Image: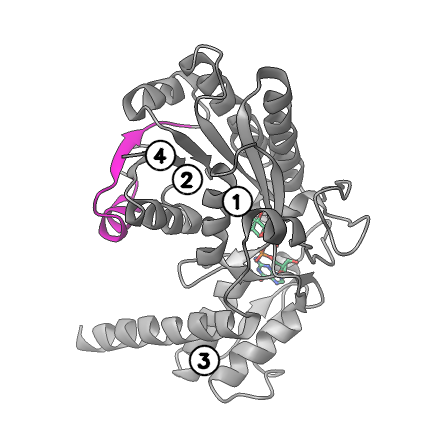
Amino acid sequence: MPRALITGITGQDGLYLGELLAAKGYEVFGLVRGQSNPKISTVERIIPSIELLEGDLRDLSSLIGALEIAQPDEVYNLGAISFVGLSWKQAELTGDITGMGVLRILEALRIHTQGDMSKVRFYQASSSEMFGKVRETPQRESTPFHPRSPYGVAKTFGHYMTVNYRESYDAFACSGILFNHESERRGHEFVTRKVTRAVARIALGLQASVALGNLDSRRDWGFAGDYVEAMWKMLQQDTPDDFVIATGETHSIGELLDVAFSRVGINDWSSKVTQDPRFFRPAEVDLLIGDASKAADELGWKPTVTFEQLVHRMVDSDLKIEKIAASRASED
Ligand code: GDR
């Protein structure tokens, strides 16, 4: 039975990856910060066989301890402060967890494997935010980075550390440069889920409008369930490498609003969306669109869910959730 350790198990990607690996017959260990973490019950419901270990990406010895217990064949580092908007307000914490956390887990692995880092396969969750103010379009593995947020800078540090440990210690370390990936499990602070929840609530008469930031930025949005498959595939190769994972399509926030509102029969959303300076960022990433042809050629990976299908499933799921919440509230 192969064994895997996932950091960031309570996040959207941790849940999908844990489910995928458990279905493939892995013994899955998840790292959690503190036993009172309110998301633990969700993890245990979605991945009943999960074994949770306490540890923190800010604490090297806790990472070494987790590796000793899990004895993993594969380690997936998905843990991070992942909300870009927050990273300006908590720049130091973002640098510590999203950036230095990668170095700490690599160091923990080096110590755990007694220097033979080829023994345990390592996946680093890198991000299209590293491209930032893009130098070429579409963005591919060779595109230079120009991050625009403390989050993007921290991810760039983590990416280069991963590459450096591969080159310095022969680590089996892969960096997946994933473009935005969403689902009904996405947190409400991210724009897709913020929109789909608001659309559901507006359709049900529970709220009148939604306040957003920049409607012109463009993203390459895929389905998170497809993207965790790519993470696993990277670690099954003969040699470690870095891959861009993306759909190759880009859409504006305005187009996201079009598709989400039309799902509930609203074709003109202009009176239902306001703009609030609080949601604009000090520096914006205007356009992202990825070229995942290397992943298609070498991993045989392709996205299976279109932008429209993704937005529809998220709106449909939020309609269900909000209906249940509204009927519970009316019973009370
Ligand atoms: P992003 O995702 O920063 O691309 O990073 P997010 O959904 O937060 O923003 C996407 C774009 O939407 C614009 N926007 C708003 N964003 C939010 N969150 N809330 C708003 O009200 C709003 N209005 C407009 C943003 O300015 C931005 O242009 C995500 C994260 O998951 C990262 O962790 C990951 O690395 C990258 O995707 C790939």
Q: Residue furthest top?
A: 114
Residue 26 visible here: yes
Q: Are marks 3 and 4 in contact (CB under 8 Å)?
A: no
The residue sitting at 18% across, 72% down in the picture is 332
Specify which label sits upstream in the sequence, 2 or 3.
2
Circle 3 crowding by C-alpha within 10 Å: few under 14, some 14–19, many from 20: some
Circle 1 crowding by C-alpha within 10 Å: few under 14, some 14–19, many from 20: some
Q: Residue furthest left?
A: 331
In this view, the residue in front, 297 or 64, is 297
Q: Residue 318: give x, y in percent of width and height.
A: 39, 71
**Kind of residue at disc 4:** Ala
Q: Quadrant of the N terminus?
A: top left
Relative height, residue 141 to residue 240 (above, below): below
Which residue was labeled with disc 1?
A: 82
| Magenta residues (range) | 37-56
**Kind of residue at disc 1:** Ser
Which residue was labeled with disc 2?
A: 8
Task: Quadrant for residue 278, please give it.
Answer: bottom right
Q: Residue 293: give x, y in percent of width and height.
A: 66, 54
Q: Nearer the viewer, mark 4 or mark 2?
A: 4
The residue sitting at 70% across, 57% down in the picture is 288
Separation of disc 1 and disc 4 at Cα?
22 Å
Q: Is residue 282 left or right of residue 230?
A: right
Is 52 one of the magenta-colored residues? yes
Q: Residue 148: give x, y in percent of width and height.
A: 72, 44
Which label sits on residue 4? 4
Q: Are marks 2 and 1 in contact (CB under 8 Å)?
A: yes
In this view, the residue in front, 199 or 171, is 171
